[in-house]
Image (cartoon, rainbow, N blue to C red):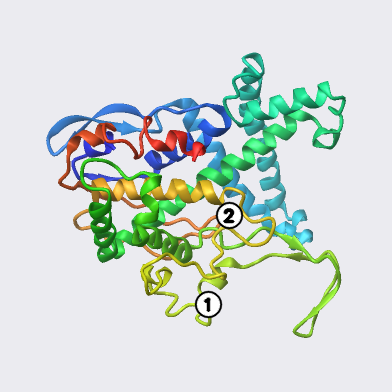
Amino acid sequence: MTKLSRRKGAATDLNAPLATSVSNVICSLMMSIRFQHEEEEDEVEGERVKVVDDTSGPRFRHFMGLIEEGFRLFATVASVNFVPILKYLPGLKNAYRKLEKNRLEMAEFFQETVDVHRKTFDPENIRDIVDTYLLEIEKAKEEGRGELLFDGKNHDRQMQQIIGDLFSAGMETIKTTLQWALVFMLHHPEAQRAVQEEMDGVVGRKRLPTLEDLPYLPYTEATLLEVLRRSSIVPLGTTHAATKEVNLNGYRIPKDTQVVPLLHAVHMDPALWDEPERFRPTRFLSAEGKVTKPEFFLPFGVGRRMCLGDVLARMELFLFFSSILHVFRVECPAGASLPSLKGNAGVTVTPDPFKVCLVQRPTDAEFLSMGGGGGVSDGSALRYVGGH
């Protein structure tokens, strides 16, 4: 927050700062790794100041490049799951080769982490998810069931896959949702003001919001829920399969048919939502002003295979979103057009690149250095979000 405030309201692309901060949450929980927000000199309003530069670290830059490339390639080849004959097309063959290379590089990155953890492993001091898996592997070997763990498959290979799944799902989706939240705040300044007024009344101006404030900030939570509904950044849910042959509305669905829930269609169905195209946070508030979520609100999927990061994701979104709006007014740069609401479809639906002006609100400046607790920084509640 302190580093962003040094921009003094200048037009800023938040993609890199958000990527670093969100990555650090999931990396801390999984691997006890944190990438640094490095600084460099820049000129803002004629004054030389230090500003955050999240992409200057080569290791982080390479890591994030692999994640982004993997998402892009996966979106390219995903159609083969539904139309297998497409795998013979030259373009998709090439994409598959690139995807395999991407996976191997990611596996090497994660294996380095596993190797370091194995060398420094202490069963009396479990640091993160990797340590937890190493502990379970040791227990399984001691109990003579080592070959049964992971169904007898290579333990390190399984850990690489798990780390990759958790990171890719836990970073890209959170970052993209926060970007959409900022886009909608630019389009709906009245909602932004309502969120800020609510936080000013509950949190005050001498500290940042914490998870303990969430039950007392219903409009803020409802605004995030509306962002999740309206953006539907993951338009397709997890693939399921028919366990037996069924007939649905006159159509025969054979056993083992892949079934993919179209979450975006549910969230934009006028039969379920009043004026679904409108951004209206109050649709998630009851007459008493309490947060209410209908059963057809499905941002994290549906069924037993819904997103396992539901709780962590909602905590992250609240802390990042509330902290940014508590400290800054989010404004469109002078002369710039509002970002498009259409989005770009892929594995996730992402907004077009855009810049915002973060104008600092009147406040006690001390809490920007985390003197008041909470917020988005290396010393914040986000570092320990797993503890909640």
Q: Is residue 27 above or below residue 235?
A: above
Expressed as whole percent of the image width and height from the top left, the position of residue 204 reads 22, 48
Report the number of numbered marks: 2
Identity of the residue drawn at 76% across and 22% down: 138
What secondary structure is found at the residue carrying circle 1?
Answer: loop
- Please tell me whether mark 2 sits on a helix, a strand or a loop: loop
- Work out how far the residue at label 1 is from the one at label 2, CA to CA, in angstroms: 21 Å
Front residue of 215/159: it is 215
Q: Does residue 280 sit above or below 193 in this rendering?
A: below
The image quadrant that residue 70 belongs to is top right
Vertical placement of 102 versus 339: above or below? above
Residue at the spot 56% in from the left edge and 37% down from the top edge: 66
Tag 1–tag 2 contact (CB < 8 Å) = no
Q: Which residue is at the far front?
A: 288
Numbered badge on residue 63: none
First in sequence: mark 1 or mark 2?
Answer: 1
Identify the residue position indicated by label 2 in the image. 347
Q: Which residue is mark 1?
A: 269
Identify the residue shown where x is 66% and y is 58%. 238
Left or right of 33? Residue 216 is left
Residue visible at 80% across and 36% down? 150
Residue type pointed to by label 2? Val
Find residue 374 and report its horizontal and vertical position in percent.
34, 39
Quarter of the rendering occupied by the N terminus: top left
Q: Quadrant of residue 8?
A: top left
